[in-house]
């Protein structure tokens, strides 16, 4: 049986060294590379094409969600879908979890879980399954339930926005991940030229929450930056 080839992308040296030592001690696993930041990590993933990438969400130069999105784009361009991505984090907020999966993560693992569970998560991810940490399973289930019809026909449906007048590839993404009402509000403020800080102040939310929503919006609009997202929103008629 061939070994599962793993790349570690983690900025904390001691954590990364500990993970490497723990993984290498298990038969069937081989750490073929590691990186302390997203920039080096992305290059490493593109060059080594491991079976599983264990990616910390809180990288200093680019968070793990953005790294995931960029690597998925690279995989699409090269038609190479071999590498699975397991997000490693202490963050279990709904925004972070959903943003990670929207960006293309396969699995989501909490750092405070045992190393044996990490082995289980890596094996499941390698086999093509999405391993979801029990600590955040309810977040995913709740999001799934929100998309189901209400038993009461008079009950309001989840507020989502479908964008028309976009290229087919963007429409397909939005059919799968439609913009929520909150994302629409933030998109309107982006078009108005507001910074993350100004958006946070206007909507009474944290800047971190704004950044997560902005990432989701960029993913759903297949946009590389805020300007491109604003242009597509205007062209589609979503924002006047």
Image (cartoon, rainbow, N blue to C red):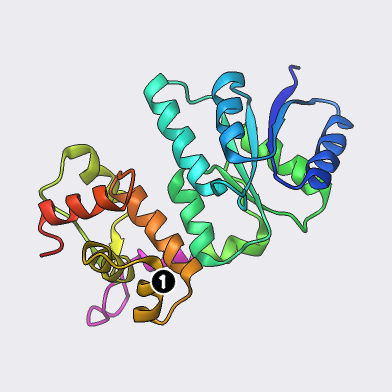
Name the residue located 53 percent from the left edge and 58 percent from the top edge.
97
Q: Nearer the viewer, residue 181 or 195?
A: 195
Find disc 1 in the rendering and name its residue: 197
* Label 1 packing within 10 angstroms: few (<14), some (14-19), many (20+): some
Spot the residue most to the top. 2
25 lies above or below 230: above
Name the residue located 45 percent from the left edge and 27 percent from the top edge.
75
Q: Is residue 119 left or right of residue 205?
A: right
Quadrant of the drawing holding the N terminus: top right
Q: Is residue 149 left or right of residue 95?
A: left
Q: Nearer the viewer, residue 128 or 4?
A: 4
Q: Is residue 128 visible?
A: no
**Which segment did they paint magenta?**
142-157
Name the residue located 46 percent from the left edge and 21 percent from the top edge.
80
Percent position (x, y) of residue 71?
A: 48, 33
184 lies above or below 235: below
Mark 1 element type: helix
Q: Is residue 147 magenta?
A: yes
């Amino acid at each position: 049986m061939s070994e599962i080839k793993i790349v570690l992308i983690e900025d904390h040296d001691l954590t990364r060294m500990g993970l490497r030592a723990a993984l290498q001690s298990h038969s069937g696993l081989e750490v073929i590379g590691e990186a302390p930041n997203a920039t080096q990590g992305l290059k490493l993933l593109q060059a080594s094409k491991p079976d599983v990438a264990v990616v910390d969400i809180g990288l200093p130069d680019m968070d793990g969600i953005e790294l995931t999105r960029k690597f998925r784009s690279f995989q699409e361009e090269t038609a190479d879908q071999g590498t699975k991505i397991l997000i490693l984090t202490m963050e279990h907020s709904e925004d972070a979890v959903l943003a990670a999966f929207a960006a293309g993560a396969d699995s989501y693992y909490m750092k405070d879980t045992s190393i044996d569970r990490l082995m289980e998560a890596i094996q499941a991810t390698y086999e093509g399954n999405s391993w979801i940490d029990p600590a955040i399973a309810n977040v995913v289930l709740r999001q799934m339930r929100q998309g189901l019809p209400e038993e009461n026909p008079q009950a309001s449906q989840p507020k989502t926005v479908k964008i028309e007048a976009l290229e087919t590839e963007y429409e397909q993404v939005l059919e799968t991940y439609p913009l929520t009402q909150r994302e629409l509000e933030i998109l309107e403020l982006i078009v108005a030229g507001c910074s993350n800080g100004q958006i946070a102040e206007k909507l009474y939310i944290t800047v971190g929450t704004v950044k997560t929503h902005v990432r989701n919006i960029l993913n759903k609009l297949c946009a590389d930056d805020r300007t491109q997202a604003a242009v597509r929103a205007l062209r589609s008629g979503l924002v006047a």
